[in-house]
Amino acid sequence: MMKRRFALRSRLVRTAPTAVMLLVALAAGSTSASGRLEINQTVVTAAGGFPYTISSPGSYVLTGPLVVPSSTDGLVLEASDVVLDLNGFSITSNAHCDDTGCTTGSGSGVLALPGNRLVGHRVTLRNGSIQRFAGHCVALESLAHVEGLLVSECGDRGIDVDEGSVVKTNRVHRTGREGIRMHGRGSFYGENSVSSAALAGGGERALEGGSATSGNACDDQSCTPRGERRFYLTRTLHTGGQASQACDPGFHMAAVTELSDYGQRVYDLSRGYQLPDSGSGAPVGSISGAAGWARSGKSLSAAGWSCDGWTDSSSSMTGTWTTVPALNPGSNSCGHPSAVWCIED
């Protein structure tokens, strides 16, 4: 698309299957009246202790609290299509956060199998608390649904999910990095409360990525109000070929039409370039004489020019772009360094 600068013998053979079946039953836990597989501290101990692995799709329910040793993962998902109801119980370890920082290291609460992006998708996690882990408290892949959790004292992120996920009605408190982090596109969050995040001092915000629905509260004001999308002009310069990779995770290079929707966006002062007279909005001036790269949203010219994939070029772009007041580039070359307009996914 055109741009504008803008996861043994016969006797033993007969008895072995019975033993195997018994072991599996112990490892998986009994089945509740509702048909869900039960997980509790006794079940975990019979299975060999933590981390406890969920390796089959299905519905699981906690029937008691889980206490996890330090530097150890709690529940590890080696399957997708899992529903895990904490049933009001807690999963806790012994890390600690206070106002000056958090215990950091290994050990997460509930997570998709690390290093395998093929599992851990379409997971529903709800109704309980996950606390005091030196790593992430929750880390899942795409299409996750995380609801009704108390997440606190996490050395890394509180809730970390991938694209197409829904995160709602959670309370997140005291995390080393972001309270809630939503990667990729198509994710939504609503009715969450996030406080005392980013205690490690790495510059992260209480909430990153995703699109807001309603009722979110973040003590650093990073939760976007309903219907609004954050946008910004980068503080660094990029050529046309670099522009599509210039935006922060959770953002993409904006199209001119997205930038023109003035009633549905808010300028991100924590990321964006500002001029002394910018106030709380976008800069009215420019960096290096150009307003910034943006996707034109228009068809290519007859010559087929596009900056996609280019790292440097002096080819003229004259006549290719449609002029947009205030967003018109100051140069017609893909090789010209300029800021980039970025908008929330």
Image (tube, rainbow, N blue to C red):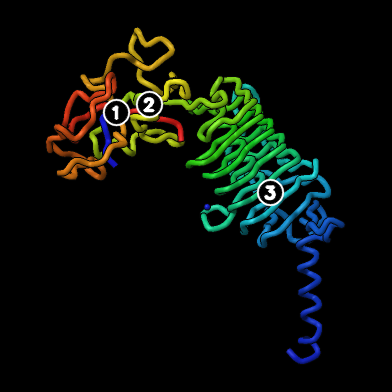
- Observer-side mark, 3 or 2, equals 2
Say left or right for 56 vs 32.
Answer: left
Identified by mark 2, the residue type is Leu
Q: Residue furthest right?
A: 33
Q: Which residue is mark 2?
A: 259
Judging depth in this view, the residue of 290 and 129 nearest the camera is 290
Identified by mark 3, the residue type is Gly
Say left or right for 131 vs 32.
Answer: left
Judging depth in this view, the residue of 243 and 134 nearest the camera is 243
Q: Callout 2 environment at 10 Å: few (<14), some (14 to 19), or many (20+)?
A: some
* Mark drawn on residue 74: 3
Q: Are marks 2 and 1 in contact (CB under 8 Å)?
A: yes
Q: Which residue is mark 1?
A: 6
How many numbered marks appear?
3
Disc 2, SS: helix
Whether residue 83 is situated above or below residue 232 in the rendered picture: below
The residue positioned 26% from the left and 32% from the top of the image is 4
Q: Callout 1 environment at 10 Å: few (<14), some (14 to 19), or many (20+)?
A: many
